[in-house]
Each structure stands twice: as C-alpha cells, then as structure tokens.
Image: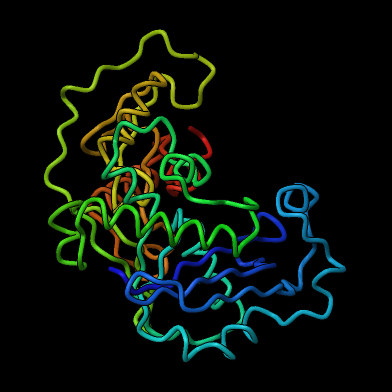
Amino acid sequence: MKSFVAFDFETANRNRHSICSVGMVFVENGEIVDTLYELINPEEEFDSYNIAIHGIKPQDVSSAPTFAEFYQSNMEKFSNKLFVAHYLPFDGYALRDALIRSHTVPVSKRLLCSYQLAKKLIPSQSSYNLKILCEKYNIPLLQHHNALDDAKACAYLFLALTTKFEIKDENTLVDVASIVSGEYSLSGYRSSYIKRGKTNFSDIEINTDADQAHPFYEKNIVFTGTLGAYKRKEAAELVAERGGNPQKSVTKVTNYIVMGEFENTMLNGNKSSKLIKAETLISNGAELEVISEEEFLKML
C-alpha cells in the first residue's frame, strides 16, 4: 500500500466528464517520486459556480490538451497502478465518464478511496472533508481545490492511515477495514466497496421530530447494490435521522430504491432482485422512484 497514484480532478461544470484540470502524485515505497499537473480543455462551457471553487477560467484552457490527449500521452504511467482519490464516487466516475465520452480505451488500474478508508478507520470524526482530515494529521494543504495540492494531500493522508493502522497490502485492507479495491479495465468500471455481512435495521430509531419538509420524511427507502460513500446501515441511519423509514426489502409502500453503482448496473443489466421487483411495481402503477447514490446524497 506504499506504492500508488493519488489523483484529483476539477471540472468545468456539473458534468463529471468536464474535467478542466488534473493533479496526480506518484508514490513509490512511501515516497513521492513524481507529480503531474495539467490544465485540460473540457470542450464545454464553464459554470460560474465551478470557476468560483477552483479559479480556472475558459481562457486558461483554450490551448490545453483534451482529457483524451492527456490520458493517451501518459498511459504507460497509469497501467496496472493503484489509483487513490479522496471521494472516489466523484473522481473515479469522472475518469470513467471522460474516457467513455472521448471513446478512449482505459488501461487497467485498481481503485481506492481515502474518504471511504477514513470513515471506516476513524468513525468518530465529525467530518471527512479533506481539509479537516489534513488538519487532524498535520498534512499541508496549500490550496484546496487546486488539483495537484489536493492530490498531494490525498497521498499523504492515505499514507498516514495505512501506516497508523498497519495496512500493508490489499489483503490486509480487507482484514482491517473490510474494503475491497475497485477496478477499471476493458471489462468495465467497479468502484471500491465495503465487504458486508447482513445488515440489521431493527435497532435504528426513526426521528419523529425531523423536518417534515425533507424529501425523506415518512418515506420508505430501500438500498440495493454497493454504496460508495457510506455503509448501508450508515445510509439507513441518515434516512432515519430525517424521519424516513429504511426498509430491508421492496414492498408496495416503498417510495425510493437507492442504487449503488447506478450507471454500471443500468449499462450492464446486472439488476438485483430488489430492482427487478421495483420495476415490476412501477409498471403496475406504484409511486416508486429509482435513484442513484449520487441523487440520494444530494437529497440528504
């Protein structure tokens, strides 16, 4: 776990494929041996909101390479590497979406998330924001939302966590944190995930004093597939805090079914029994909505 590539993307707008800058940090045996920073022409319009976050403007990238050009020129550096991002549900899918959009064939790589690892190893944290975790571990973060600075911070954080908890390899990672690395290759994209046993919702207390205007208030919610940001029970507890009712299975009164790895499931047709039942109920007139984990997080 001491050799990997930490990476971070900034985007021009809400589309994950609209990458406008790349930061990568190459770590070998626990030491940074190389860094890579590149402005990228997303060939799309910039949103003012995104510009306010990272400061990159359209004129800054007018002569920059596209993401496909950047990726193809650096393929040898990426092949069969372990890639680590802080919040893989964004950066991992941004990588995938940018390559799909440009019809670029990916080289094989494994994927892990320092955000997911921190949540698993230090559950008492009030926040898992990169800046806050850097403060906790005295890691310098010179310019948050500069892709290279964020990638460096991610690299140091990942090293700090794996060192403190004596995680030496991916087998140890499963033993210590129950995290299985993801993969991106010709066969498709799969994010890292937490290996789970059966989830028990019976001890979760629903907040009856929650905001009645919240979209999950008094709604019945089912989870299916592998979630990236939370364990399934953690997600259920967040629903309960907002006055919702987490369900183990899909019924006629289910309001939402939240899908982990939404795009992968829809593209490859690997539908769970819960999703198949939900689609049957919807076809019979049930007021049930299938949403991605990304949509779920926004609604929270």
Residue 42 position by quadrant: bottom right
Considering depth in this image, is 276 or 186 the residue closer to the camera?
Answer: 186
Residue at 72% in and 82% down: 65
Taking the image as shown, residue 122 lies to the left or right of residue 142, namely: left
- Horizontal arrangement in the rendering, residue 44 relative to residue 130 (left or right): right
Q: How many numbered marks does the figure carry? A: 0
| Image point (64%, 78%), residue name | 67
Residue 236 rendering spot, x and y as whole percentages: 30, 32
The relative height of residue 281 versus residue 73 in the rendered view (above or below) is: above
On-image quarter of the N terminus: bottom left
Who is closer to the viewer here, 254 or 171? 171
Residue closest to the eye, 51 or 172: 172
Q: Nearer the viewer, residue 71 or 29?
A: 29
Please give left or right for residue 137 compared with residue 60 in the image: left
Query: Residue placed farthest to the right in the image?
Result: 59
Rendered location of residue 202, percent (x, y):
16, 24
Instruction: Report x, y in % for residue 74.
Output: 55, 87
* Residue drawn at 37 percent across, 29 percent down: 238
The picture places residue 173, in percent across and down from the top left corner, at 20, 59
Q: Looking at the picture, does residue 246 appear above or below residue 168? A: above
Please tell me in which quadrant of the rendered image residue 163 appears.
bottom left
The answer to whether residue 83 is left or right of residue 237 is right
The image's colour scheme reads rainbow
